Image (spheres, helix red, strand yellow):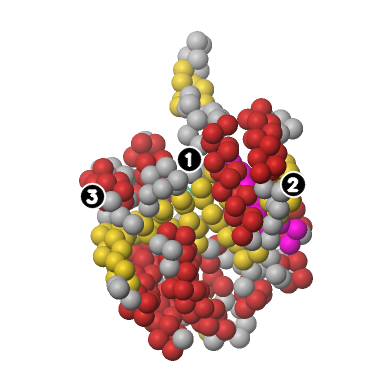
Amino acid sequence: MTQSYQITLLPGDGIGPEIMAVAVDILKVVGKQQDLTFEFNEALIGGAAIEAVGDPLPKQTLDACRQSDAVLLAAIGGYKWDTLPRHLRPETGLLGLRAGLELFANLRPAQILPQLIDASSLKPEVVEGVDIMVVRELTGGVYFGQPKGVFSTETGEQRGVNTMAYTVAEIDRIGRVAFETAQKRGGKLCSVDKANVLEVSQLWRDRITDLSSEYPDVELSHLYVDNTAMQLVRWPKQFDTIVTSNLFGDILSDIAAMLTGSIGMLPSASLGADGPGVFEPVHGSAPDIAGQDKANPLAQVLSVAMMLRYGLDQPTAADKIESAVLTLLEQGYRTGDIQSPGTKVLGCQAIGETLIQNLNQG
Ligand code: IPM
Ligand code: MG
């Protein structure tokens, strides 16, 4: 029987629409092959939504997302909106979407593909075989803690405030996702905090340690975030699964991404306890190359694979997409961000067409 899914598409800003177009074509082809039908509903977010309706996350968009089986997001943001008041910034739309759908668990894999070892800025022997999953807490911590804002002190001086806070329940639920993720991977979990300085981190460390008794098959370690940043570029192969708070995860996932050569390759999945997940590339909207057919659509395409695997429970369809990407790299095709001597640079659209050929031949 044909399985049918409602997918909300949020192309957003910059290169978003170009990479989304490629991803949707791929999804349609795989759908035909696997007897899945997709009903697409496009909605506004970020700068595009600010331009159209003056709100980076219109209520209509959040409602549409809630009613769908999964949400595929491209990228938001651009110089044009960087100086607007915070409630009107594209980023506020994205944070509102994460909070509105209660997507507390953000999975960011960083895997070195053998074909791209030369694209990494690190030595091949350092990055070869790297396969890390960063589990980032996404709806708490300093991104959302109260109080926040810019306030006047008694002397009339302005004072900016954000609050890094986690409740036990928030730590436990991300901790469980992380332990379960590690169980399905290499069985090693590294919890990252700043417990030598921050109380909130001490609570984090204590809870993760307590939880570990329920997962005796997972080997747990703890590292401070500054040391983790160093270890990630020194010897990344020591890591399997990393669990950390919102801000630390934001930073560490960019470092992990760069090990692979380009942030243009990395997908992510944001999941809640139930309800639809949001699947999006880790990279941003790259306004400098928008509209020039230069963008790398592979992170977006791999986000489709994550959507099929983690959001829709269609692992075979996900495998097909991932193997079409590997074949394309094997064939020597690259976008500008991952080119190396001897490879052939293609535009965003041509990468999509080649992927479709690979899918049809695979
Ligand atoms: C990310 C981005 C976002 C974040 C921005 C765009 C709000 O950097 O998804 O990593 O900080 O979470
Ligand atoms: Mg980030």
Q: Reading the chain from its start, which is encountered first: label 3 or label 2?
A: 3
The residue at the point 31 percent across, 63 percent down is 5
Q: Mark 2 falls on what kind of element?
A: strand
The amino acid at mark 3 is Ala
Residue type beneath disc 1: Thr
Query: What residue would you read off at disc 2?
Result: 221
Region of the chain picked out in magenta, as a range: 237-251
Give the vertical position of 247 relative to 38 (above or below): above
Residue 247 screen position, x and y as percent: 57, 42
| Residue 256 visible in image | no
Image-quadrant location for residue 75: bottom left
Residue highlighted by disc 3: 52
Label 1 residue SS: loop
Of 113 and 215, the residue lying toward us = 215
Q: Is residue 249 magenta?
A: yes
Tag 3–tag 1 contact (CB < 8 Å) = no
